[in-house]
Amino acid sequence: MGTIAVHEFVSLDGVFENPAWTAPYGFTEGMARAVGALTAASSAILLGRTTYEMFAPAWSGRTVDDDPGAPFFNDTPKHVVSSTMSTATEWSNSTVLGPYRATAIQRLKDATDGGIYVSGSGTLVRALLADGLVDQLHLLVYPIVLGTGRRLLSDGMGQVPLTLAGHEAYENGVLHLTYTPAPR
């Protein structure tokens, strides 16, 4: 059975939208190792429609010479949660799961051997958290307050008890916080 590992870049005030604001901080070797470990443990990618539509043109033309993550993003099976898309032909190895249904995500977990990597996809991540389908939540928290923008964990979500499973600080001020579901 697969596990879902969510990876997000967030500001101190929880903004995850358009993470171009992360560029001034660079991407340290420690951060590369952390994200690399997540992708190495994953045999599938799960994305919401908006993130898929941003990732597809950004990653589909990249090679390993452009970015060491390109083979993972291009060769790994991708599953898109969308109520408006019927096909996902613009990026290889992509399929549309249809609208969000917790039972469909659980079936994907049951059918996947290894990790299922999720990045961005705020609406999807909030639903996965609410339905108890996230096994690991990896937040790379940047030392900046943006004051505006879409927040990952928005008002009205309801409580989602989590346990801190790990933490790491990088020399650029970014914290990697790893959470798992709290024991019930």
Image (cartoon, rainbow, N blue to C red):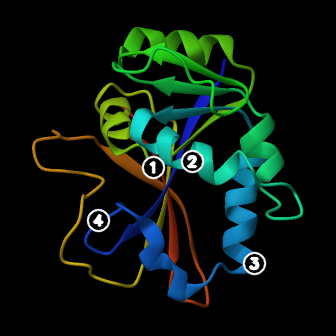
Q: Nearer the viewer, mark 2 or mark 4?
A: 2
Q: Residue furthest left?
A: 156
Asked whether, in this view, residue 169 is left or right of residue 65, the answer is left
- Residue 83 in sight in this render: yes
Q: Position of residue 50 (x, y in %)?
A: 40, 41
Look at label 4 and name its amino acid: Gly
Say which quadrant the N terminus sits in.
Answer: top right
Residue 29: image tag: 3
Q: Residues within 10 Å of mark 3 (few under 14, many from 20)?
A: few
Whether the residues at callouts 1 and 2 have beta carbons within 8 Å, the answer is yes
Q: CA distance from mark 3 to mark 4?
A: 24 Å
Residue 78, percent from left and from top: 64, 29
Under circle 3, the secondary element is: helix
Q: Identity of the amino acid at label 1?
A: Gly
Q: Is the residue 178 above or below the residue 131 in the image?
A: below
Residue beneath label 1, please?
A: 120
Residue type of the residue flagged with mark 2:
Phe
Residue neighbourhood size for the residue with mark 2, other residues' Cα within 10 Å, grouped as few (<14), some (14–19), many (≥20) = some
Residue at figure coordinates x 69%, y 81% from the top left: 28
In the image, residue 59 sits, relative to residue 130, either above or below, namely: below
The residue at 65%/78% (across/down) is 27
Whole-Å distance between the Cαs marked 2 and 3?
A: 23 Å
Against 141, residue 124 (above or below) is: above
Q: Which residue is mark 2?
A: 55
User: Is residue 21 rendered to the left or right of residue 43?
Assistant: left
Tell me which label, 2 or 4, sits earlier in the chain.
Answer: 4
Q: Position of residue 117 (x, y in %)?
A: 61, 39
User: Where residue 155 sits: x, y (%)?
Assistant: 11, 49
Residue 87 as seen in the image, left or right of residue 126: right
